[in-house]
Image (tube, rainbow, N blue to C red):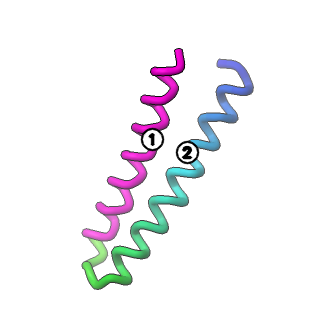
Amino acid sequence: MSPLQILSLLLALSTALNIAITAGLLARRSGVGIPQAILTGAGTAATGLGIYFAAVAAYR
């Protein structure tokens, strides 16, 4: 992997983590339990990374 690809992947992971934390906190604030808020955040992170990998695959 080139350094640019590694930095791009780290940026995607950082973005997914930030979005996951935000979604989890919003879910928790809306009144759901902690386990469901964690699942919401994890699902959001997986969706974000899935979109990133789909975009990379479509670009190539």
- Classify mark 1: residues with Cα within 10 Å, few (<14), some (14-19) or many (20+): some
What secondary structure is marked by label 1?
helix
| Quarter containing the N terminus | top right
Check the image and report above or below for 40 versus 47.
below
Quarter-wise, where is residue 38 in the image? bottom left
Q: Residue at x 49, y 59 (%)?
A: 19
Which percent across, then down, holds residue 55? 48, 29
Check the image and report above or below for 41 versus 33.
above
Given the current orientation, which residue lies at the most extreme right position?
Answer: 3
- Is 36 positioned to the left or the right of 26 in the image? left
- Is 44 positioned to the left or the right of 17 in the image? left
The answer to whether marks 1 and 2 mark residues whose Cβ atoms lie closer than 8 Å is: yes
Majority SS type along the magenta span? helix
Q: Amino acid at mark 2?
A: Leu
Q: Which mark is residue 13?
A: 2
Q: Residue at x 42, y 51 (%)?
A: 45
Which segment did they paint magenta? 36-60
How far is the residue under mark 1 from the one under mark 2? 7 Å
Check the image and report above or below for 49 versus 23.
above
Q: Amino acid at mark 1?
A: Leu
Q: Residue at x 45, y 60 (%)?
A: 20
Q: Is residue 52 magenta?
A: yes
Q: Which residue is mark 1?
A: 49
What secondary structure is marked by label 2?
helix
Given the current orientation, which residue lies at the most extreme top position?
Answer: 60
Which percent across, then down, holds residue 12? 57, 42
